[in-house]
Structures are given as structure tokens and as C-alpha cells.
Image (cartoon, grey):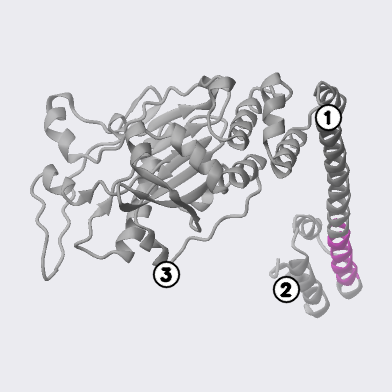
Amino acid sequence: MSVLCGTVRYRPALLLVTGRSPSPTTVNTPADLRNLITPSVLCLTLFGQRLTAVFPSNCDSLEERMLEEPIHHPNDKLLKATFSNPDNARGFFQNYLPAQISHAADWNSLRLESSTFVYPHFAASESDLLFSLKLAESDAFIYLLFEHQSSEDPRMALRLLSYILRIWERFAAAQPAPAKLPAILPIVLAQGKRPWKTAPRLEDLIDLPTELADTLRPWQPTLMYRLLELVRIPYEELAGTPEGIMTLRALTAEPVEELLSDALWEESLLFAISDSALERMLRYVLNADLNVSLLKERIKTIRSKPLQTKTMTLADQLRLEGKEEGKLEGLSEGLSEGQLRAFRTAVQRNLEITHGSYPEGIREALDAIEDPQRLEQLLESAIRSESIEAFAQKL
């Protein structure tokens, strides 16, 4: 393995796969491998947002579906709530897919599926949406992956390859051979304040000896993705439906602290979006902990009095709602901490009554335990243990 410019490059390896089958397939050259793949499907990947897409709708019959992770990040909530709507998703895809693919798609067939391919350890920085549609009269999927990590991933191509393999594996489980695998086109939409420097090719991560590069390259997996970076796209060039544009502008503005800029408060957009979309946008803005006085001054610049009044009223309602939620969370946390202190005190008191005293290390160990059920078990042990040593073994 060698390291170049901070990016780990992977050495090529010889992979031999054997197996028994009534009608075995022989792969002698890279061309033979390419013949196993059909262009009937497309995958897109949204990073910062990441977009990905396609294969047949009968994948819906897969018995093993990956369960969607709960959405905790406000960026995820905004993106999913907006682009789960087929009209908003259609407007986005029509503008950001290659023109030839967009023209070949039957957009009336676009529908949201229930599936996720994000690994659990990326759930805090990624979420995804899967759509099915007809592409050139073939069943296909569009996979939208939203990535909102603050820094770029130099191994993005490798991560994309792992998601593509998971899509293919689930397709293969539902469509046994000789059905060909669907083609997948990855597109990464990145959210962040700085442009990416990562090359969008898997080949650039593989360490090929110069003198053998031309010979080895055809035998390596190849992957290239299109990178769309929000930080490089001017607000006025973001395209789609009014709600889609508003969401993309908000996602663009948040990392660079421009949520109160004119771009996000363009009156024609505010008029065009639904009340639910306006509420989503205001929730997103309020979640950024902006100065409330500055937000109100921004809302007061809306020229239409009815729209200004509606926006101000909704913002006030959401602020009050947030305060109430904060009080409930604080109460819950207070009760939980009180419960822990009560259990710790009860354990220590029972040890004193039963055994007279106990080492300081036991108190420190009890203070480090945050699980009420565990402390409840230790309370019973404190009552039943024949000695301090026997109790200590339970810790």
C-alpha cells in the first residue's frame, strides 16, 4: 500500500471465483465481465446530499429490506420531507440528470420506495431515498443519497462502490441469473462550505505500477461519479420546483451562515411554496440558533402584508413549540438524573448498613454507571452479598 497526497491507494489483487452451476459462465476478459451488465437501470447519489438511481420495480419483492434509520439531523428532515414528494423529486432529477437519461425516463411512473442502503455507522451523516421509474421502457430506480458531513471523503468512490454492490446484491436475490444486473449511475451532491478536491474516480485510489498500469487497469473495478457541489452553484441557478429550490437554497446557505440572505427570502418563492414547506424552512432556520431579533427583522422585509403576517405568526408558534419541547426534554433529563442519584445512594447506604464501610473505588464505579436497570441490579446485590468483595465482583 502506498500513500499519495494523504489518500490511501489500493494495490490491485488477482481474484479467482469458482463455483458449481448447471450452466456456468466463463469470464476470460474484462469484456466478458462487462457483458454481465445491462444498461437498463440507473443509480444516482446525493452527497451533502448524494444522489443515486435505478433498477426494476420487482425489486420490491425483496424479502430482506434494510430498515430506515430514524432521522435526527435537521438537514435530513428537510431533504427527506421535500424530496419524498414525487413532484419535487421529479423536478430535481429532470434538471440534474444527464439530458439523454432525463428524456428517456417516464417521469409519470416515478414513485418512492421503502428501502435504505446506508451503513449504520454513516447514519449520522447520511440518509437516502429510493425511487422507481420506467427508463427507456425498462424498470429502473433512482437512489438519492444525502451526505452532510462537514469535510469531503477522499474515498468517496470506494464508499459508492459498496452501496452499488448492495443494490446489485439485492437485485440479484430477487432476479436470479440469467437476468443481467442493472446499470447504476452515481451522482454526488455535496453540502459544505468548501469545494471538494477529491477526484471522482475509483481508479485514482488504486496503486497501479507505472510499467504495468495499462495491463492492470482493465482488470480493476471502475467507477466514476458526477459531483455536484452546492457551494459552487449560485443560488439563482439551483433548479427544480419552488419547494425543491427553496430546500436546496437553505441547504446551501446553512454551512456558510447565509440563512437570512435575500436568496432564501425571495418573495416569489415564498408565495409559490405550500404552508407545510414554509413551516419546514422556518424550522430549519430556527434550528440554526439564529438571533431571533434578526430573524424577525428579516421577516418584516416581506412586502406582502398577508405573507409577512403568516410567516411571523408561524415563526412565533414554532419558537414557542421549541421552548415547550426543551422544557419537556429538560424535565425528562432531570428525572433520569434524579433516578440515577437515588439508586446510587440506595446502593451505598445498603453497603454501609450491611458491611459497615466500602472502598472509595466502589463509589467511583457506581458514579460512572448511567443505566438505572444496572443500578437496580446492584442494589439487590448490595442487599444479598455476603461481603464487600463479593459485591465488588458484581461491578
In three-dimensional space, the C-alpha distance between marks 2 and 3, rounded to whole angstroms, equals 49 Å
Which mark's residue is nearer the viewer, 2 or 3?
3
- 199 and 32: which one is in front? 32
Write the start and end of the magenta stretch as one range: 337-352
Q: In the rendered image, which residue does mark 2 sit on?
A: 390
Residue 63's tag is 3
Q: Where's residue 39, x and y in %? A: 25, 46
Give the main secondary structure of the magenta stretch: helix
Q: Report if residue 342 lies within the magenta region.
A: yes
At x 88%, y 68%, the residue is 346
Residue 335 lies in quadrant: bottom right
Depth-wise, is mark 2 or mark 1 nearer the camera?
1
Q: Disc 2 on helix, strand or loop?
A: helix
Circle 3 crowding by C-alpha within 10 Å: few under 14, some 14–19, many from 20 = few
Query: Which numbered circle lies on residue 308?
Result: 1
Q: How far apart are marks 2 and 1 (CA)?
A: 69 Å
Quadrant including the N terminus: top left
For label 2, count other residues whose C-alpha is less than 10 Å away and answer few (under 14), some (14-19) or many (20+).
few
Q: Which residue is rendered at x = 74% and y = 33% of the image?
A: 285
Using the rendered image of the protein, determine whether residue 126 is visible from the camera's viewpoint: no
Amino acid type, residue under disc 3 in the picture: Glu
Which is nearer the eye, 374 or 216?
A: 216
